[in-house]
Amino acid sequence: MLVVLLPHYGRRLLVTRRPLIQIGRALLMLISNLVFVLAIGRVPLATASAIGFTSPLIVTAQSMPLLGERVGPRRWSAVLIGFGGALLIIRPGSGLHDPAVLLLPGSAAAYALYQIATRWAAAFDPAATGIVFSALVGSLVMSFVPPQSLFDLLLFISLGLLGGAEHYLVIRAFQSGPAAVIAPLGYVELIGTAALGYFVFGNFPDLWTWLGAAIIIASGLYIALRERRLRTK
């Protein structure tokens, strides 16, 4: 990323007016990813993906105390209903098939706080600086945990390449089309993770997981449409 961006931005790419915020948001992203990876070693991919969709709900809930934004009763209702969908997936009263599922709301919460910190940082630094800090801090911290084999190293490299391609394609998509059309397409991820989980690992979400995921997605879409409508008034 530095090789690609440095010729255009120069050294100012690493200059930030809010270093603590940039480092903090990078650590939040790292924590979110670490916790998510720990969880998906024991939780089906589709289940993890569905619970991860609660992150926009957490952003909405925290935008009032942390960003000073007004959240009306309709969006609060959507947030509560969405969290109800997450509880339907986790089903705490069922004895929990695996306690690792409880890590996933923590991952979603860390990612939500990362998004809020990104909002703070965007007022002072360009987006390219934020991208580089997110990658650089995570890389430096995880360099203390070397891969155990050449195969692990190749897997890590593939994750980096796939993640970079994903971020690039998302940015290009938002540059080419309206956000109201592009953003909901992210929920297609659930179908992809369900298919991969079935064909690669032999697990498939049960009815309760699909129902909870539908509730979370419906709540997230309602909040997005509601915010768009309020901004256009």
Image: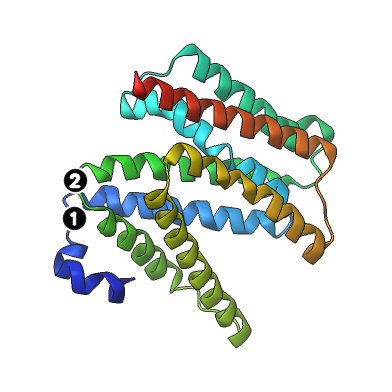
Q: Nearer the viewer, residue 99 or 76?
A: 76
- Apparent side of residue 177 relative to residue 148 in the rendered image (left or right): left
Q: Position of residue 100 (x, y in %)?
A: 70, 49
Residues packed near mark 2 inside 10 Å, few (<14), some (14 to 19) or many (20 plus): few
Q: Secondary structure at mark 2?
A: loop
The quadrant in which residue 62 appears is: top left
Q: Which mark is residue 16?
A: 1
Q: Quadrant of residue 1?
A: bottom left
Residue under label 2: 124
For badge 2, the amino acid type reads: Phe
- The amino acid type of the residue labelled 1 equals Thr
Q: Position of residue 220 (x, y in %)?
A: 56, 32
Q: Is the residue 233 above or below the residue 135 in the image?
A: above
Q: Position of residue 147 (x, y in %)?
A: 55, 79
Picture quadrant of residue 214: top right
Q: Please give the name of the residue rendered at 45% of the width and 33% of the height, measured from the top-left corner.
A: 59
Give the left or right position of residue 140, taking residue 220 as reference. left
Extreme residue toward the bottom, this view: 150
- Residue 25 to residue 149: above or below: above
Q: CA distance from mark 2 to mark 1?
A: 8 Å
Q: Earlier in the sequence, mark 2 or mark 1?
A: 1
Can I make out residue 100 in this image?
A: no
> Where residue 78 appears, x then y in whole percent?
57, 22
Considering the numbered disc 1 on the image, is that residue within a helix, a strand or a loop?
loop
Q: Nearer the viewer, residue 106 or 190?
A: 190
